[in-house]
Image (tube, rainbow, N blue to C red):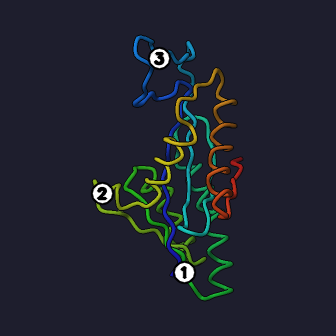
Amino acid sequence: MHIKYLDESGFSLPSVIGYTWAEVGKQKRIEQPNRRGKRISVLGIYAPGEAFNYGVSLGSIKNDVYIELMDWEAKRAAERLAETGQITVIVQDNYSVHKHWRVKERWPVWERQGLYVFFLPVCCPEMNRIEEEWHQVKAHHMKCRSFEMEYELAEAVIEAIDERYLGKGLQCERYLFN
């Protein structure tokens, strides 16, 4: 059995300012954009020690985007099943999109391809190993960065994810949504 972890994460134009410091008598100043803009959402699939694959979307993740990425993952699962006999299990939270009726219609199709979904208990996001990965990307690769346009933000998110995982020698592939 091959286990992967799926989750969404959001990024916005103004950066989240965490703990910071400044010299005594001086005030720390970080410029922020005047407009809020749309959020950039990333749907990621993490196979610890092996790969981090993801898709980037403007706005929140909807069921059609989720289905598109899972269909892509199901093709990979079918290849793994044919080559090794191993099924692929995607561990995920209980976000409503993951259980939408259109998504449920796809479950039998994915299972025939060797892809199964497993839902974590409610209120247990810490059990999803991709959560720590999102924290690392935000805390170390995107920290104290703000952007004027969504395009710049999306480029920075892609760069941060690629830098983290390719730098660790992992496979990192970005899915391009239609």
**Is residue 168 left or right of 100 when viewed as pictured?**
right
Question: Which label sits in the foreground, 1 or 3?
Answer: 3
Task: Identify residue type, mark 2.
Answer: Cys
Q: Which mark is residue 124?
A: 2
Task: Identify residue type, mark 3.
Answer: Lys
Residue 76, by quadrant, is: bottom right
Q: Residue 129 at what x, y percent from top left? A: 43, 61
The residue tagged 1 is 87
Q: Secondary structure at mark 2?
A: loop
Residue 159, by quadrant, is: top right
Q: Which mark is residue 28?
A: 3
Q: Residue 106 at what x, y percent from top left? A: 54, 64
Q: Residue 28 at what x, y percent from top left? A: 47, 17
Q: Of marks 2 and 1, which one's residue comes earlier in the chain?
A: 1
- Seen in the picture, residue 130 relative to 107 is either above or below; the reply is above
Q: Secondary structure at mark 3?
A: loop
Front residue (pair 71, 143) = 143
Q: CA distance from mark 2 to mark 3?
A: 36 Å
